[in-house]
């Protein structure tokens, strides 16, 4: 079939049944129903408004008739009346006696070959291929009376305007410039503007429509752009300003990858206000990390950008100052906005903060009272705290910072300080630092409970232990620790008669154990190089504390001996014990009860019988039979990177860890 493509749209020529509308037109293929099955001589039926046109698809032909071109859109039927200006159709000219009629598309005039038409007296016959008509030059043909000679290059036929040549009897004159056929200009589309009203549409003018949408009545560019991009049901396109990345923007993912290559460790447990914070070794700094980043990577990154990424990752460098209280911090922010006068009790936040501070002061008074009172040889008053994790080995080499190292733990039991400095120095040796590393055990509640048991065994002649600790629910304030202490106090191998745990107020837990941790950190920093775990033990011992180096068999198989059913039963009468509400908990020899106080001002003990029915606290605790081991991939990487930097007589520790390593063991990062 006869098709043409114009402006990326495909048209097909239709020969109309009603010739009053024109013999044929090129119609957009997509406007014909079922156009996918069209072929030559197919019948078509097209509806233009209220008029129905019928016709036949024409067969293919080589030339394009200018008079049959329609407009770009099918809904404008006025294009069907477009004619070729300046050229007369072959069908409208009267025949010339002895001259064959010219047929074909009007823009290119075609004369009949000499073999098919009778010769005209005085006119040379036209020869050559029929599709490209060639007129004989004037010099080659005798002049015809009344007809002006045709001049110009032979390949392009040129007709002489009627105004310049006399008419030939029987031949219609040709008017207008013949080379360029001109079509009547038509509009591509007509837009109508409607606004909804009561389930119907009301036609309005363009200015009213645009003004209703908050636009200028003379600017319909946003509407036109939306329709041209998306179609007739489009909405205004999204503002895409700011989508492109800045040319000088650095890759923050590369910065994060570099920071995480230093293996930041899990946070210290007692900092409850920052459970997601991680720490890097104290020998590192942001400046050192940034210089290494610039030396190893080509990136347009400033120091300030690098520092901000470190801050966003919530990473510190273990130089921890005093513990910050979250409740006090919130009150400090609230205080600037609160209009409450001092003591009127109208603000809930201020009232809660006053109660919090009163509780903290009372806990501190209890701490100072126990520090100042006289003890006998049968009692110890201590503070307990887990030191922040220490990564081993510690070497003055950059490779060490990029290697995953093993984690060393230190649960410190320190005698609380007294104003009598001589007495404090004399009693310092009675404190204890319980040390182990991840190849021996982890840092779960049962592991911390085992360190409490090690303290009691190290002071087996002591009858009373009073221990101040923080409110960490995974270490000190949990049912597993109380279960182990209840077992220990019933043991016939120990002289202990009573163990009392006193919990300081959250956020105000500064203790003597924290001071010992600072001394240990300074000692590690002065030593600079700690090549194996024995070096770490010696460094802690150099501060004057007794040291207990834990082995795998020193840890207990801890279990919770308290009945959850009994606890739920007490909840039914609104008497359920919550550990978070207790400030003092005590266990006694010969009793399976828990003695508790909800405040330090409470004079009477409140007791709970929560033991499971089938549990016997008189039987010995079950001890572990072997150590935990280290993750094989981790220790292999450590030995490959650092073993050559460690003194030869200290490598046996790492070689032993590597020999006992297992792939199934979980890798600890803190």
Image: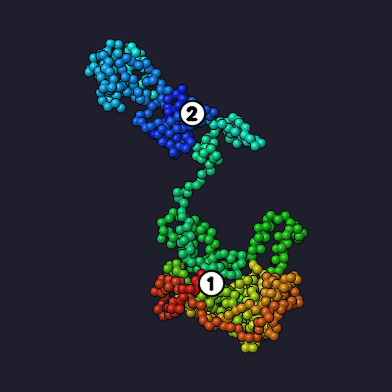
The one of 398 and 587 positioned closer to us in this rendering: 587
Residue 280: percent from the left, percent from the top?
Answer: 51, 67
Residue where numbered disc 2 is placed: 53
Picture residue at 44% right of the left edge, 35% below the top: 29
Q: State the residue lying farthest toward the left.
A: 140
The one of 663 and 319 positioned closer to us in this rendering: 663
Residue 535: percent from the left, percent from the top?
Answer: 48, 78
Mark 2 neighbour class, 10 Å CA radius: few under 14, some 14 to 19, many 20 or more: some
Relative to residue 144, is residue 389 depicted above or below?
below
Disc with the residue nearer the chain's start (2 vs 1)? 2
| Secondary structure category for the residue under label 1 | loop
Residue 271 visible, this angle? yes
Q: Quadrant of residue 196?
A: top right
- 206 relative position to 342: left or right: left
Residue where numbered disc 1 is placed: 389
Picture residue at 45% right of the left edge, 67% below the top: 402
């Amino acid at each position: 079939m006869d098709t043409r493509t114009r402006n990326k749209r495909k048209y097909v020529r239709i020969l109309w049944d009603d010739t009053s509308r024109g013999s044929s037109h090129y119609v957009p293929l997509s406007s014909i129903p079922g156009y996918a099955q069209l072929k030559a001589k197919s019948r078509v039926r097209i509806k233009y408004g209220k008029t129905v046109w019928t016709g036949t698809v024409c067969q293919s032909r080589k030339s394009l008739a200018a008079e049959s071109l329609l407009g770009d859109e099918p809904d404008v039927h006025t294009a069907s009346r477009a004619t070729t200006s300046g050229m007369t159709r072959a069908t409208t000219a009267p025949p010339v006696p002895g001259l064959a009629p010219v047929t074909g598309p009007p823009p290119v005039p075609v004369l009949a070959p000499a073999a098919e038409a009778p010769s005209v007296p005085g006119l040379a016959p036209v020869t050559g291929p029929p599709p490209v008509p060639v007129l004989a030059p004037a010099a080659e043909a005798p002049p015809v009376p009344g007809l002006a000679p045709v001049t110009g290059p032979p390949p392009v036929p040129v007709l002489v305007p009627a105004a310049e040549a006399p008419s030939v009897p029987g031949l219609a004159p040709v008017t207008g410039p013949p080379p360029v056929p001109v079509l009547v200009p038509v509009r591509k589309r007509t837009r109508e503007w409607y606004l909804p009203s009561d389930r119907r549409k009301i036609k309005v003018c363009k200015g009213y429509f645009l003004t209703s949408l908050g636009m200028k009545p003379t600017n319909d560019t946003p509407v036109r752009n939306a329709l041209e991009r998306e179609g007739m049901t489009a909405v205004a396109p999204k503002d895409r300003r700011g989508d492109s990345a800045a040319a000088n923007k650095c890759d923050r993912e590369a910065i994060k990858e570099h920071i995480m290559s230093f293996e930041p460790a899990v946070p210290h447990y007692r900092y409850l206000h920052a459970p997601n914070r991680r720490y890097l070794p104290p020998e590192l700094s942001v400046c050192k990390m940034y210089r290494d980043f610039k030396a190893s990577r080509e990136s347009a990154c400033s120091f300030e950008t690098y520092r901000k990424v470190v801050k966003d990752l919530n990473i510190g460098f273990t130089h921890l100052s005093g513990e910050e209280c979250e409740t006090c911090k919130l009150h400090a922010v609230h205080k600037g906005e609160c209009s409450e006068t001092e003591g009127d009790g109208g603000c809930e936040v201020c009232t809660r903060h006053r109660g919090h501070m009163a509780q903290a002061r009372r806990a501190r008074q209890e701490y100072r009272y126990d520090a100042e009172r006289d003890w006998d040889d049968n009692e110890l008053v201590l503070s307990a705290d887990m030191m922040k994790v220490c990564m081993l080995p510690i070497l003055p080499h950059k490779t060490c910072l990029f290697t995953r190292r093993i984690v060393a733990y230190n649960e410190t039991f320190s005698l609380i300080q007294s104003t009598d400095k001589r007495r404090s120095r004399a009693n310092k040796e009675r404190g204890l630092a319980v040390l182990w590393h991840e190849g021996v055990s982890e840092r779960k509640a049962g592991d911390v409970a085992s360190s409490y048991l090690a303290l009691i065994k190290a002071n087996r002649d002591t009858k009373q232990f009073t221990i101040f600790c923080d409110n960490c629910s995974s270490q000190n304030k949990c049912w597993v620790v109380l279960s182990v202490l209840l077992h220990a106090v019933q043991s016939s191998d120990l002289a202990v008669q009573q163990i009392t745990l006193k919990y300081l107020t959250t956020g105000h837990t500064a203790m003597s154990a924290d001071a010992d941790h600072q001394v240990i950190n300074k000692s590690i920093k002065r030593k600079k190089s700690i090549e194996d775990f024995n070096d770490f033990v010696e460094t802690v011992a150099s501060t004057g504390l007794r040291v207990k180096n834990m082995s795998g068999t020193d840890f207990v198989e801890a279990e919770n001996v308290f009945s959850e059913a009994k606890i739920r039963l007490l909840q039914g009468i609104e008497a359920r014990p919550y550990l978070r509400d207790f400030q003092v908990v005590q266990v006694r020899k010969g009793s399976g009860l828990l003695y508790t106080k909800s405040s330090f001002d409470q004079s009477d003990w409140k007791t709970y019988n929560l033991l499971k029915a089938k549990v016997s606290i008189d039987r010995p605790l079950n001890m572990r039979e072997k150590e935990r081991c280290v993750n094989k991939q981790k220790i292999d990487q450590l030995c490959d990177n650092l073993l050559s930097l460690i003194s030869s007589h200290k490598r046996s520790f790492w070689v032993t860890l590597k020999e006992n390593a297992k792939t199934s063991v979980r890798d600890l990062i803190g």
